[in-house]
């Protein structure tokens, strides 16, 4: 395939389009992890539809957002949350997806190719996030014309009123990291050169938006893990490994959608350049997911063993660890059923047959 500098995006897109492949059944990789759906899923779907109609009235974007079934995603991610926490966490998901589409989807926004507009949008977003998650949530003074940004307000209000300062800080840090990494992503996309696989994966830990969702786990289950534990190296490994499982599985399952939008700065195309074939690219991605699953299991065992003599902390850690595992199974199950990624319903046990 040549070096990263020797193939253009158009050439790469042309090389990938029309190829057929079989994506393995990713669910078998973590069939030892829990999965489930919150019993309030139908009520949540109705709430999601109403909110989307308010945000994107009468538009094609509304139709596509409804078809994505974000209610199922959230109900699978937080299957044991009470309804109010589930609703707020779902609003976070809606905000993250809509905000991300605004920055990387040419279908919806001019900011994808406009560095200056993108920078202003990110700056306004971070200012708004900081005010929304401040201690005095009622003193919100920052104004922006973007309803994509201000759509975050109910999430910020709920988190500010329910969470501790340490939890709010963690949540804000994850959100800001997500926003800032989209700037790195845009720089990759506007460059003539591709990022390396390693550069892409480092950036993906932010752009995946997994971090903010994991930070909502304590809110969803009305608990607080002592902050020092949340800063331990094994906890960081748990977060990052969970993030890699979700983001790499997403990169595999969303490949057809990304190529349809002429986006090739994602993991599989980059691995395709490196290894020279799609099967080799997918084999490498699957192997990385397997290693990340092992890292989740290993770090979880270490954390639980370390606090096995403290039943209160142990119980909270178990809930958080299960939350990470539910996030992974939820992401794959939803990705296989949502209309967002254009995957045809089929028997997944034989893999997913796909023509790019």
Image (spheres, helix red, strand yellow):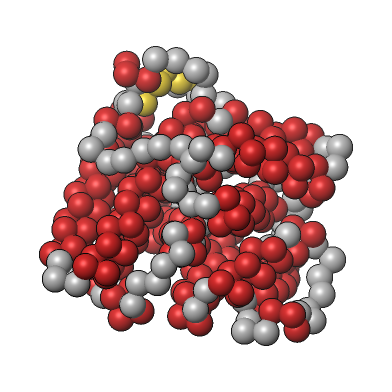
Assign the N terminus to one quadrant of the image: top left
- Residue 61 drawn at (x, y percent): 75, 39
Q: Residue at x 59, y 28 (%)?
A: 339
Q: Which residue is drawn at 75% across and 83% down?
A: 139
Q: Which residue is drawn at 50% across and 47% down?
A: 265
Q: Quadrant of residue 185?
A: bottom right
Residue 316's place in the image compared with 288, above or below, is below
Q: Quadrant of residue 318?
A: bottom left
Residue 155's place in the image compared with 29, above or below, is below
- Residue 283 drawn at (x, y percent): 27, 34
Any part of residue 157 in sight: yes
Any part of residue 73 in sight: no
Q: Which residue is drawn at 51% across and 37% down?
A: 39
- Residue 307 drawn at (x, y percent): 18, 70
- Residue 315 drawn at (x, y percent): 27, 62
Please indicate whether residue 114 sits to the left or right of residue 14 in the image. right
Please indicate whether residue 136 sits to the left or right of residue 254 in the image. right
Residue 197's place in the image compared with 335, above or below, is below
Please indicate whether residue 295 sits to the left or right of residue 7 in the image. left
Residue nearest the observer in this picture, 276 or 227: 227
* Number of numbered tags placed on the structure image: 0
Residue nearest the observer in this picture, 254 or 96: 96
Residue 40's place in the image compared with 161, above or below, is above
């Amino acid at each position: 395939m040549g070096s990263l500098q020797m193939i253009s995006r158009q050439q790469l897109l042309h090389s990938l389009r029309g190829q057929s492949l079989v994506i393995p059944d990713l669910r078998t990789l973590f069939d030892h992890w829990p999965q489930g759906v919150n019993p309030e899923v139908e009520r949540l779907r109705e709430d999601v539809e109403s909110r989307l109609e308010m945000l994107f009235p009468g538009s094609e974007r509304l139709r596509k957002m409804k078809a994505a079934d974000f209610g199922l995603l959230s109900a699978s991610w937080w299957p044991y949350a009470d309804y109010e926490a589930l609703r707020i966490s779902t609003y976070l998901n809606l905000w993250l997806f809509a905000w991300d589409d605004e920055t990387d989807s040419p279908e919806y926004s001019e900011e994808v190719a406009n560095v200056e507009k993108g920078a202003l949008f990110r700056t306004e977003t971070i200012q708004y996030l900081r005010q929304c998650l401040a201690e005095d949530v009622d003193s919100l003074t920052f104004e922006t014309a973007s309803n994509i940004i201000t759509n975050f307000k109910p999430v910020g209000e709920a988190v500010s009123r329910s969470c501790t300062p340490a939890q709010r800080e963690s949540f804000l840090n994850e959100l800001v990291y997500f926003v800032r990494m989209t700037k790195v992503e845009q720089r990759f996309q506007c460059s003539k050169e591709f990022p390396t696989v390693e550069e892409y994966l480092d950036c993906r830990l932010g752009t995946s938006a997994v971090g903010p969702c994991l930070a909502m786990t304590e809110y969803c289950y009305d608990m607080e893990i002592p902050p020092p534990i949340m800063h331990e190296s094994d906890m960081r490994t748990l977060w990052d490994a969970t993030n890699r499982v979700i983001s790499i599985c997403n990169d595999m399952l969303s490949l057809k959608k990304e190529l349809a939008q002429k986006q090739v700065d994602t993991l599989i195309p980059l691995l395709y350049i490196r290894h020279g074939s799609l099967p080799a690219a997918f084999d490498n991605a699957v192997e990385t997911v397997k290693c990340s699953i092992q890292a989740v299991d290993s770090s979880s065992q270490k954390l639980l063993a370390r606090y096995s003599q403290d039943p209160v902390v142990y119980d909270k850690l178990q809930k958080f660890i299960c939350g990470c595992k539910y996030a992974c199974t939820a992401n794959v199950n939803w990705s296989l059923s949502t209309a967002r990624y254009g995957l045809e319903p089929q028997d997944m046990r034989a893999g997913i047959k796909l023509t790019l």
